[in-house]
Each structure stands twice: as C-alpha cells, then as structure tokens.
Image (spheres, grey):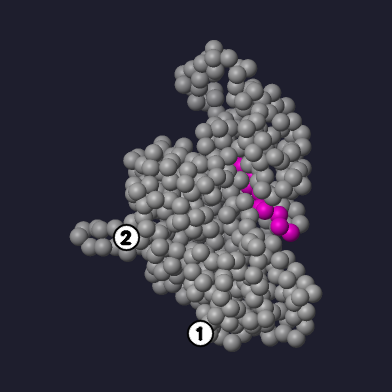
Amino acid sequence: LVPLLALDAGEQRVGVLLPPGRGGAIVNLALALAGRTAVNLNHTAGEAQVKRMCELAEVRTVISATPYLRRINVATPGRMALLDELLPKAGKLTLAMRSAGGLLLPTSWLARARADDTAAIVFSSGSTGDPKGVELTHRQILANLESIALGLELNADDVLLNPLPLFHSFGLVPGMWLGLVQGMASAAHPDPTDAKALGNLASEVRATFLISTPTFVRGYLRRVEPEQFKSLRFAVVGAERCPGDLKAAFKERFGADLLEGYGCTELAPVVAVNLPTVARDGMEEKRHRDGSVGRPLPGVQVITVDPETRAHLPTGSEGLLVVRSAARMRGYLNRPDLTDAAFIHGGYNTGDIGKVDGDGFVHITGRLARFAKIAGEMVPLDNIELALQALAGLDIEVAVAAVADPAKGERLIVLHHGWTGSAEDLLKAADELPALWRPKPRDVYAVEAIPKLGTGKRDLAGIKRLAAEKVAAPSAA
C-alpha cells in the first residue's frame, strides 16, 4: 500500500481519514510497518481544526476513501490519496507479488519501524486553543496492549466489537490494535450511534466483549435487542463517568457486566478497569467495586500527590492522580513546555482528583478543571451531575457547569434535555449534598441538546459556553 501512495522520502507523518474497520486497519498497519507515523484525523472537530492538525503534524498527504468523504463532507489541506482509486491501479499481479514478499522475505529486510519511533499522533479535541498532538511510540502502544490482554484475561476465542473512531485513543489502541497484535477476531462499525446496525453486527460475529462510552450505551439500551448481545461476556466503557443505574440497566437487559474503566490518551490509553467476577478454587473473586474505575492494569501504578505541593500522599488520601506506566507518551508534539509540565514523579499528571483505596481500586472525584470555586471552597461538578442524573433517569441528560459570579466567585448552572418536571423537582436530588453543592432553581435551563464531541465524550467547553449564554440571555436577567 505505502509504495502506491508515492510519498516523498521526508514525508514521515501521514493523515488518515477513515472509519474503524478493514480499510482503516490496513492503512494504519501499513504505515506502522513502513516506519511512517499515522495521524488519524478527527473530522468531527470541524474543517478549521482538521487543517490545524495537519499543519501542526506537517501532514502533506491524507488517506481516505470517496464514499467516506462524501459522508463526512470535510475538506483537508494537501494531497488526498483515495483507497478506492489507488488499489485498482496496482493490479492483481503487483498485489500478489508484494504479498508474497511479505510472507517469504526475512523480517529484517521488511521491518523499517523501531520500537521507540512514533507510531501514532492522537490529537486532543482542541476545544480551547490549538489541539495537542500526543505522540505514542510502538513500544508504548505495545506495552498498553500487553497490559490490557493480561488484565482482561483475553483468549483466542474472544471477539472484540468496536464502534469507536480511530481518532479516539480508545478506538485506536484497544479498538483496532488489540485484535491485530493478539491475533484475536474483531469487528468494527463506523457509526457508534447506529445501535440497530451494531446489534446486528454483534449477533453476526458473536462478539464476546464490547468497548464503548456511557453516552453511546444509552442508545444500545433503547434500540438493541437482548438476543443480539447474548454472546457478550462483558462491555468496557470509558471516556466519561458511568452512572450506577446505567450499569444495572445494561446487566438486566443483556445479562452482561458493564465495566467502567479509566484512561488517558497520554497513557496509550487504558490505566485501570473493573473486571468481571470469577470463580477460583471454588470461591468467587469479586474484581470490581462500585464507585471505582477498577484496579490499575498489570504494569501500571497509580499514586496520589498533593495538588499544590506535589508531595506524595498516603493510600486512601484524595489528591492529584499520577500514573506510572511503560505506556506513557513520548510527549506532546513540538510542545516540550507542556510535556515537562505533564511529567512528575516519573509518571504522568492526569489532572484528575481521586484516591486509591486500601484494596487498590482507583476512585475518581473529578477533573481538577471540573471543580467550581464557590465562596473559597472547591465543589466537584461531576458529583453534582451524578446525583441529578440518578434522579432524572437514563432517558434524561443533565450537565452541570460553573459560570462567574461576582458575589461568590462562581455559581452552578444546570442544563437538561428531556426533563419535563419542575426545576425544584430535579434539584431534590441535591438535598443530601453539602449546601454549596446545591444549584438554585433559577439556574436550571432546558436545552435542545447537551453538547458532545465526536468521540462520545461530553464537550465540556461547549457545555460551559452554553451555560454562559443561558445566563447572559435577556430572559435570564
């Protein structure tokens, strides 16, 4: 494939604009084996952000396919190489000869990549300012894949189902690379919101485990039939907090555990995961804990430090989470300043506040950036969201943001979609929370939709902007 692209010798980084599936996997694998760096572009961020990603990574060629480009309708800078035009030009004889060479020639003749070369650059969403390019080497990706395989105790009979995009680190590493490296069957679907098609695919391939996000799983509960997911042993969700009632509803409908995990793109990406209960020597071993994101994977260590002094904290103390792992990124592309700030105590500063309990389970309180400062106290927005969401139910979406307040520094704003009751009724869920954590009825707003990113995560910057707009609107005065 790579010779067909006619890349210049200095063209190290190549853009990829393809959905998860056969084409996306072949392109990423070909680039890796050829010693090039794949830059899977997030088209949902918009044309301006895609253009900026290409500029930052010095991408001159983007690989895509005509049907997919028509669907997403996003223009890219530089040269576009279309798979549906390239492959027919090669001819069957050329493809056969190159395939034979790959099978018969010594590996040393073929392998161009080295373990510490950058295999992939995964960009952040860039909600504020320039997107950050996370450089992941072959060694780092392989380290995380090994940890995942050991932690989940996967075997050759497992079949992975991945609906997450390749520009999402969860969709790229466990979603695509796990099956390729472990020799395990996997299937992908290009649209994580198409629950009906995903259910059909799960039934067809007899998927044994699914990776997704809580936001997408809500759709599966409504539109996937229990029979379609009957082969699932479990599903792992990440990227955002997973409410307990969502886990219970998934178990009741599909008979499989919905297990919450935790990770960061900068850690390639999986750090910890809850695991299914297993029987060993006639005794049940419970390997998940409600309210936690599970224990760290093999080869991964999570510690807590004081957010201000960076001093180590004892087990069970809440603080800033720092992760030590062989999968820690090389750094942020061309940003040594950000890289230096992210590396502390031989690990990665996650920016998350949480704790590790006495049994090793990791508990996340929230992002350091997701705390409001009200009357001098730190108030976790995620905890308020979870309380309100539990009362509202799975079919209602609730988001909490903080906006500036001249009297107390910040004030809490609640956005909801689908709630038909009064603001007072929704806020009853906050009655048991500390006084400063309780939003006021005047600060509750109905919205047409809760902003989301293409990865399935909530768009936190978009939520904050929408909250500020609601407060500033004349009707809110």
Q: Where is residue 13 in the image (x, y as percent from the top left)?
A: 68, 37
Q: Quadrant of the C terminus?
A: bottom right
User: How far from the left and from the top, in percent, is residue 115?
Assistant: 55, 39
To which quarter of the image does residue 266 belong? bottom right
Residue extent of the magenta highlight: 119-128
Are dots 1 and 2 in contact, CB under 8 Å?
no
Give coordinates of residue 204: x percent, y percent. 39, 39
Please give the label number shown on residue 277: 2
Which x, y percent locates residue 41?
66, 43
Say whether residue 422 is left or right of residue 226: right
- Report whether residue 270 is seen: no
Q: Quadrant of the N terminus?
A: top right
Residue at x-position 74% and y-position 38%: 76
Q: Which amino acid does label 1 sit on?
A: Glu
Image vertical order of residue 177 relative to residue 23, above or below: below
Say whether disc 1 or disc 2 marks the residue closer to the N-terminus: 2
- For disc 1, the marked residue is 432
